[in-house]
Amino acid sequence: MLGIYEVPEKWGNEGGFEALKAQAVAARSYALAVTNNGAGNICTTEACQVYKPQLKSGKWAEAVRATRGWVVTKGGAPAKTYFASTSGGFTISQWGWSGIKDVKDDSWPGGAYEKVSGSPWFYKAWFKTRSGATCVRSNPWLKSEELADIVNAWQVLYKGGGDVSRISPANSSCWGGNPYSLSELAGIGGYTSVDSISVVYSNSGNTQTVNVGTNKGSIGISGEEFKRAFNLRAPGYIGIKSGLFNIEKL
C-alpha cells in the first residue's frame, strides 16, 4: 500500500487527510478484489492502479496505517472499488448508478470538480501511445479539412457509398493497409471544410450529438457514431477515449 501513487500526499497537510484515508481503503479493496485476496496479479499502471517501488512515508503512510484492515465489501467479498483522478464530470459505479453529475454548479466542463481542483488530466485529447509514439503528430488539434475528413469517414460508415475497410488513418506508414487519401474520401462524401462544431450532452454522462457546420450545410451526428468514425480515421494516434467528450474550435 505504501507504493500506491494515486493522490497527492500533500492533501494530508491541506485539510484532506480523510481523502487520503478514503483512497487507501479504495486502493486496498480494489487490489484484493482484482487479485482474489492476493492469489492473483494486478498491473502497476493507471490501467489498474499506479504503484512504484519508492515507498511513501509521511501522511500517506499515516493514512494507510489508520485504515489498516478496512475494506469495502459487496456480497461478503472485497468490492472492485473503481477510482480515477479524472472522470470528466460524470461517474458510474458497479452498483448500477449512472449519469451521476459530479459538478460544482451544474455546468460542464467549467463546473466539473476536476476542473475546479486543477486536475492536469482533465479535458485533454490524446495523441501519443503509452510508449510515447506520435506518428509524426506534435499535437492533437485537427485542421478544418482533417475534421471534414472525419465527417466523410462517418458518411461512408453510416450512409454508404464507399469501402468501409479503407476507413483508417490516411498516413499508412503507422497503420498500414490501403486507406483512402483525404481527396479520395472527399470525392465520396463531398465534405471539404468545417467552420463550426458544437456538442449536446445527455443526462447519462455521454455526448449525445455532435453538430457540425460544413461546406454542405449543418449536420447532426450521434456522439457514438462520431466517436467511432473519429477513432477509425483521425490522423496519427489521436483518439477519443471516453463517451463523454467535447470539441471546440480554436
Image (cartoon, rainbow, N blue to C red):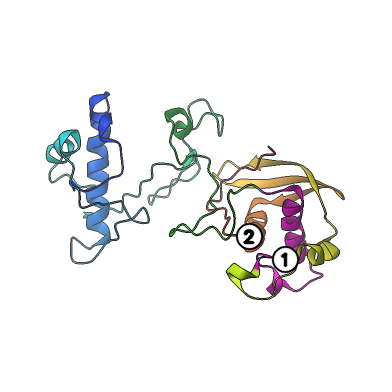
Q: Is residue 148 inside the magenta stretch?
A: yes
- Indicate the amino acid at tag 1: Leu
Q: Which of these two is toward me, 32 or 185?
A: 185
Q: Is residue 77 inside the magenta stretch?
A: no
Task: Give the magenta range.
Answer: 142-171
The disc placed on residue 173 is none
The disc placed on residue 228 is 2
Q: CA distance from mark 2 to mark 1?
A: 9 Å
Hey, which quadrant is residue 57 in on the image? top left
Vertical comparison of 62 with 167: above or below: above
| Res. 75 in view | no
- Indicate the amino acid at tag 2: Arg
Picture coordinates of residue 133, whole percent (x, y): 50, 59
Q: Which of these two is toward me, 222 or 77?
A: 222
Judged by its main secondary structure, the magenta piece is: helix
Picture coordinates of residue 33, whole percent (x, y): 25, 58
Q: Residue at x 66, y 62 (%)?
A: 233
Q: Residue at x 53, y 53 (%)?
A: 241
Picture coordinates of residue 167, whole percent (x, y): 69, 68
Q: Residues within 10 Å of mark 2 (few under 14, many from 20)?
A: some
Vertical comparison of 137 with 12: above or below: below
Q: Residue at x 24, y 31 (%)?
A: 18
Q: Which of these two is toward me, 45 or 28?
A: 45
> What kind of element bears circle 2?
helix
Hey, which quadrant is residue 65 in on the image? top left
Task: Count all numbered tags in the image, as a single digit.
Answer: 2
The disc placed on residue 157 is 1
For residue 153, side relative to residue 102 (left or right): right
